Amino acid sequence: MSPENAILWAIAVPLIGSIGILLTGKIANLRETVTLVTAVIMFLIVGSLTHIVLSGERPSVTLFEFLPGLTVTFTVEPLGMLFGLIASGLWIINSIYSIGYMRGNNEGNQTRFYFFFAIALASAVGVSFAGNMLTLFICYEILTLCTFPLVTHSGKPEAMKSGRTYLGILLGTSIGLQLLAIIWTWHATGTLDFKAGGILDGHVSGAAISVLLFLYMYGIGKAALMPIHRWLPAAMVAPTPVSALLHAVAVVKAGVFTVVKVIVYIFGYEFLAEQLTTNWLVYVAGFTILAASIVALRQDNLKRRLAYSTISQLSYVVMAAAILAPLSIMGAVLHIAAHAVGKITLFFAAGSIYTAAHKTEVSQLNGIGRKMPWTMGAFAIAALSMIGVPPTAGFLSKWYILMGALSVEHYFAIGVIVLSTLLNTGYFIPVIYNAFFKEADDKDDPHANHGEAPLPMVIALTATAIATVLLFFFSGLPLELATQVVGK
Amino acid sequence: MSATLSAHLPALQVVLPLIAAPFCVILRKSAAAWFIALVFSWVSLGISIMLLEQVLTHGPISYLLGSWPAPWGIEYKVDKLSAFIMLIVTSIGSITMIFAPKSVNLEIPKDRVYLFYTMYLLTFAGLLGITITGDAFNLFVFLEISSLSSYVLISLGSERNALTAALRYLILGTVGATFYIIGVGLMYQMTGTLNIADLAERLPEVAETRTILVALGFVTVGIGLKLGLFPLHVWLPNAYAYAPSVVTAFLAATATKVAVYMLLRVYFTIFGTDIFAALPIDEFLLVLGLIAIVTMSGVAIYQNNAKRLLAYSSVAQVGYMVIGISMVTATGLTATILHLFNHAMIKGALFLALAAVFYRIKSVKIDDMAGLGKEMPYTMAAFVVGGFSLVGVPLTVGFISKWYLILGALEKGWWPVAALILFSSLLAVIYFWKVIEVAYFKPRPESADTVSDVPLSMLIPLWVLVGANIFFGTNSNLTVSTAMGAAKALIGGAP
Amino acid sequence: MMDLSVEIPGLFNYWIVIILMMAGFYIVISHGNLVKKIVGLNVFQVSVFTLYISMSKIDGGAAPILDETIKSYSNPLPHVLILTAIVVGVATTALGLALIVRIRDAYGTIEEDDIIELERTDT
């Protein structure tokens, strides 16, 4: 298979799979098999592109031209490669987990669930392989729309209300700001292709750059910069597999991925670094990191706490990219990967607890570590990665971000990282401590006698926890890709 | 034979449906009348395509009716713009006619169905006549032919409100048409000609006189009434809401488009861009357009009748077209002309989808549409795609027109305008999502009968339009290049 | 300064046109009775007919007949146009009145205020 065909197939396979899911919807086992097989094939196809990208090639395929001079084009470059690998790889694990979760909780409309999940993955890979800003925008919008039925899966009034918040913020920012920024870019430069070094140099200058940056950064609602972060906690009404793969990996990472793409390939980080008016982004991101962490401290609902932690971690990526030093941008790239495996593990754990023990609040988790050692063990590993303790993946990315901040002597950023590490410790460590070392106080609870969650779920969360550690020891591939992104 | 026939295509385009109309009356059979209307719509579509091809390859066509030389005789003139508009009108007509019979038989008493097709053909002929004629007074005659027959079409609606809606439209429409002939009369008084090309040549000499400026005012208001230009749109929501479903689909997709065409002709062919320096009509249009897109989209949010909701949305969409005109640039006009086509496809699809809904549940109230996503999956899926196109989601035609409109605004440096256009798209998301949420995420009430999807004879034309939304949204070369050519001719053709 | 004693008689027709136009338009807007609205519409249209006819008149011109004795004649074109416009006007009036008959059948009244009241109770 030529690399060009591989790109198309990587997007087509989940779409074909989604049709397969619809057709086999009546027979649950067959349907789940279709999902799993689709996920594996997709991962293999995406994986087959890795060595080509590593060798320096940038395979590209143009589907059609839909406005004169504007095409729908997919080009694989290192950053997209990494995101594609993460999204498709974690889909396999998440599918295994979903089977356990959806059956364990007797959820309805499972065919619709798997169907839209597959489409969401296709659009996530579309985002990662997009060759120009418009293609990215199209896939970004499809991703928003096809995750709406997943967020509102239960169909209850509060789910519908959250769904409206979700759609309102994501569509509102992308149509209102991002599209304007894209058309402005096109108007100014006559191109929307992603180019190393950016395309804006010499076309836009002065305060306009700052305005354009604002339109992009707040137009990418999926990156959840404050104050447009509210959709993410709202999305937590979704079933946990959705929160795990989409709202810890695919959707939110599509957001920060777009941020990094825009900074590196549209503006060009060296061009941005020369500007005097654009460093507000570091402060906004830094503020979001701290504020979201403080809010997370106060959340008793486990999934909401994780959601605010995600908001804070996403801003790490934004801040790292906004520091505009090569090392920090590498850190941003690595953090996309590190946070993905870590946070999906945490959500898996939250879902396991809900399925096995029917508990959703942090305060109910005393002593649960003894009943669910695998789940809480994985939770602990992932939490350490969030804090940035070696030997976990989180340490690696934080290290690079710190190094980058030091290289340009950005002391605000360094301060934020140090402070937020303390806050992270503050909202994760008590959970782990209480789970393992406090006595359970749920004797009256009818669900008190529970063991581990169903086997598929345990397998999934163990696998991602191991991946969190492995990513620390075997970081060659992501590091190499990150190096290629900054071109150093 | 083919050579002589093709030379007379411009005349045939109007004459054929005009002659066909009385045959429907003579035959008095619903099926026969439908068949005549169907055949002649498709023949006209064929003629439109041939005319467009001729214009694209050989340039504008001038046809002298009865061989009387212009400017004394009536001249029919086909250029890129009019060929493009005719393509819109005939393609929508052909598609709605396939869709029509089942819906019409349900909504219109059996003994009047043949009259429906008669009136449809007259409207059709009138609209084509407006587009093709090169004579300002002849245009008025065709305007009245299309208007009078469309009043009848609207009054055929099944509720009694249809009658009052039709009468209101008749009064305002007649006032509008009369304003138009006052304007034309004043222009004739100053130039002594009614031929549009001739007018364009002679007007500059007297362009600064008060008579001509007054004429421009009268014509603008007159066409504005037909156009549904805010705040002259008051007749429109009721007329669209209470007309038979098929009529709404046909008129919404064609009548306002032809009115926009008239506006373009008057401003750019007759008066030329210099007139905007003498009278700030462009700024006036910009303000009205902006108010329309924001307030009318806002009003649409609060409608419970889906047809009414889309009617208000149409007024807002006319606002987009008017904003494009107000830019007085090639890009702005390209956006307007593109949106003429694109909006015809969007609203055609949406109103046909509603016609299909009405066919099954006898209502287009949003509350009554609960749970239809499951029961009528193909119809509602068409509605969803049409809605996305209305909002301007990429890969649909709505995105293409919005792209050019915003590009035009940026070229002029009109930042707030670009922002307002995007803001009103967000309002469109809200009012359209209201329908989606009810149809897909609310269960069908226990008391309601279960319904199935509509027959293929309705689904196919509906999906042809939906397909056009996607096809021209992903492959816009034909529409964009034609619109751009027409826009450049309009701007450049000014003296 | 225009000399009123000369201008007003010379522009007499146009003054009448304006008066008729405004009167007709006012009736259309202000009267609640639908038949009267149609009457107003007719007056409004007739004013325009007069406008066209007036502009075609040439001082001392005869009727436009092809004859060697006639040197100067009125412009025939506006007459022809207005013949068309009259036909259109008649059609509009007929259709309007027909609709009013149907409205009276459906609502039992032709007063706009009453109709609006009935429509409100409909929905």
Image: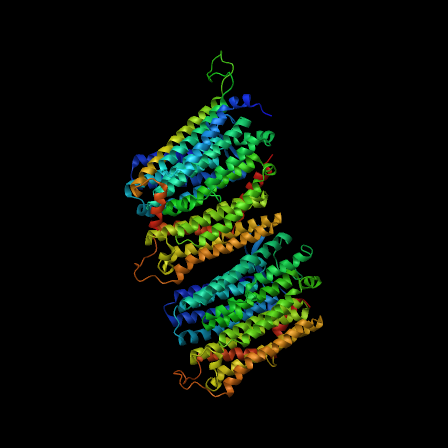
Q: Position of residue A430 (x, y in %)?
A: 54, 82
Image quarter where the N terminus of chain A lies is bottom right
Tally of numbered discs: 0
Position of residue C14 relative to residue B319, above or below, is above
Furthest-top residue in view?
Answer: C69
Q: Position of residue A334 (x, y in %)?
A: 61, 72
Q: Is residue B116 visible?
A: yes
Q: Residue at x 59, y 54 (%)?
A: A183
Position of residue A265 relative to residue B286, above or below, is below
Position of residue B289 relative to residue A101, above or below, is above
Q: Position of residue A241 (x, y in %)?
A: 47, 72
Q: Residue at x 46, y 48 (%)?
A: B314
Quadrant assignment, res C109: top left
Q: Position of residue C90 (x, y in %)?
A: 38, 30
B56 vs A283, nearest the viewer: A283
Image quarter where the C terminus of chain A lies is bottom right
Color encoding of the figure: rainbow
Q: Is residue A475 visible?
A: no
* B186 sits left or right of B380 in the view: right
Furthest-front residue in view?
Answer: C5
Furthest-left residue in view?
Answer: B111
Q: Residue at x 54, y 72 (%)?
A: A308
B493 vs A412, nearest the viewer: A412
* B233 sits left or right of B205 in the view: left
* B352 sits left or right of B409 in the view: left
* B140 sits left or right of A399 in the view: left
